[in-house]
Image: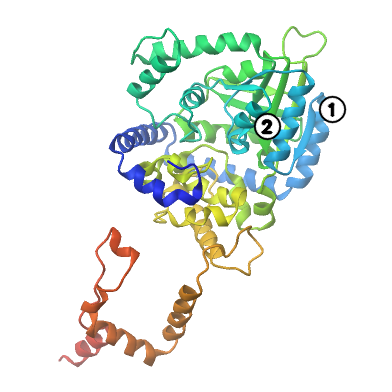
Amino acid sequence: MHQAPEQFKHNARQALGNLQLRKNFRGAMDFLQAKRKGVLPDDEFASLSARGEAIKQRCLSQLPELLEQLEAQCTKNGIQVHWAATVDEANGIIARIVRAVDGKLALKGKSMVTEEMGLNHYMASHGVDCLESDMGEFIVQMANEGPSHIIMPAIHKSAVEIAQLFEEKIEGVAYTEDVDTLIAIGRNQLREKFKRADVGISGVNFAVAETGTLCLVENEGNGRMCTSVPPVHIAVTGIEKVVQWLQDVPPLLSLLTRSATGQPITTYFNMISGPRKGDEKDGPEQVHLVLLDNGRSQAYADEELRKTLQCIRCGACMNHCPVYTRIGGHAYGTTYPGPIGKIISPHLLGLEATQDLPTASSLCGACEEVCPVRIPIPKLLQRLRAESQSPQSLAMQGAGASYSRLEASIWTLWSWACVHPRVYRIGSMMAARFRKCIGWLPSAWKTGRTMPIPAARTFHERYRQRRQQP
């Protein structure tokens, strides 16, 4: 598949023809839906999600002030804070930090923001080997692919495909489909790398402005090793991850883990508050925090689109999306696939590249129902569709990318006819009389569906006839 959102339609058709891929995703999504349902009863979800929404909206309403407070507290704790407006700036900052310690090997914990930056390829071009340590990310990196899910990057692969990959890529490994054995092989490979790593790189789930604490959620222990074993730790996060108080974290953490993997709590919850102190025996000598904007300020500036930034990256919307379940994550050609990807990617990449993504939805509302922070995803998709047809709009980069003068004229004519009853009745009567000709009209609708044929008589004709009956 082409890793570009401009190729979304081509990729989707290709994915729909891959029966193994569809089987893998169907099974995985059913499993995740059942796990979430088992730990998140509807009545508790209603109250907890309302609380999560309120926390995120309160924090976003004070975002500039909280970011300044976060920087001040982190600096006080000994964390060096860096600001990046674009992915190029963020990559450049990280390269300079690594170069300053003459680093050649960086171990990376799971981080979607660094995927957004294309950090691995950038570091490779600067002579630094950047190795993924999350098992799912380790697998997709070995396969030279990107993640297909924000929580489970290798969810598109079956055990057979992973077994074949390990046998082919890791010297001396025999074919086995035993999951425990495969995980042990991967961990042994990574443990040797941890001993030699110069830099550890991680994401951040929550950045607490009150205390300057960076919170990291994980299950494998690789995140803790990335943040504590190498002498330098670089944490990278989007600016929307900041929360005001430490007490904001528990409800969001509970929503995150239960919505993402159906776990009451993850195996590890790391709270990073600074580099190693003089009397401590372990921990990094330097801790850096890179705060990335990359289009998030655009979403923040619009009161409606700002709700996009409430996302805590649990992936529940993907697990319940009928479109994502059938085509998988790679078809989108973006770092963030599924419903959340369709509303965040236009801010990161512009509507010129992502104009097809907001239309890839039936607006069934399943994503909004399961969202732990109540993001109105269907409403935001409709707003983005309108933005892509509005060349005069200043709210979005690439607004008007889908604008068609012919289509706009047709809708203008339709609007005019709807407010002129005589014209509307004549038009609907003509459509009824020549209804069989409508099936001959060229239309993209007919490529996958049966063209609807109007009734033989209009509603007004049937109504008049009914009133005349005794």
Q: Tag 1: residue type?
A: Lys
User: In the picture, residue 330 is in which quadrant?
Assistant: top left
Q: Position of residue 314 (x, y in %)?
A: 52, 36
Residue 348 in sight here: yes
User: In the picture, residue 179 is in which quadrant?
Assistant: top left
Tell me the crowding category of disc 1: few under 14, some 14 to 19, or many 20 or more residues within 10 angstroms, Cα based: some
- Residue 302 lies left or right of residue 280; in this view the side is left
**Which residue is found at the position 48% from the left and 53% from the top?**
357
* Farthest left residue in view: 470
Tell me the crowding category of disc 2: few under 14, some 14 to 19, or many 20 or more residues within 10 angstroms, Cα based: many
Residue 244 in sight here: no
Using the image, determine if residue 4 lies above or below residue 363: above
- Residue 35 lies left or right of residue 208; in this view the side is left
| Residue under pointer 2 | 236
Q: Nearer the viewer, residue 321 or 368?
A: 321
Using the image, determine if residue 93 lies above or below residue 413: above
| Residue under pointer 1 | 76
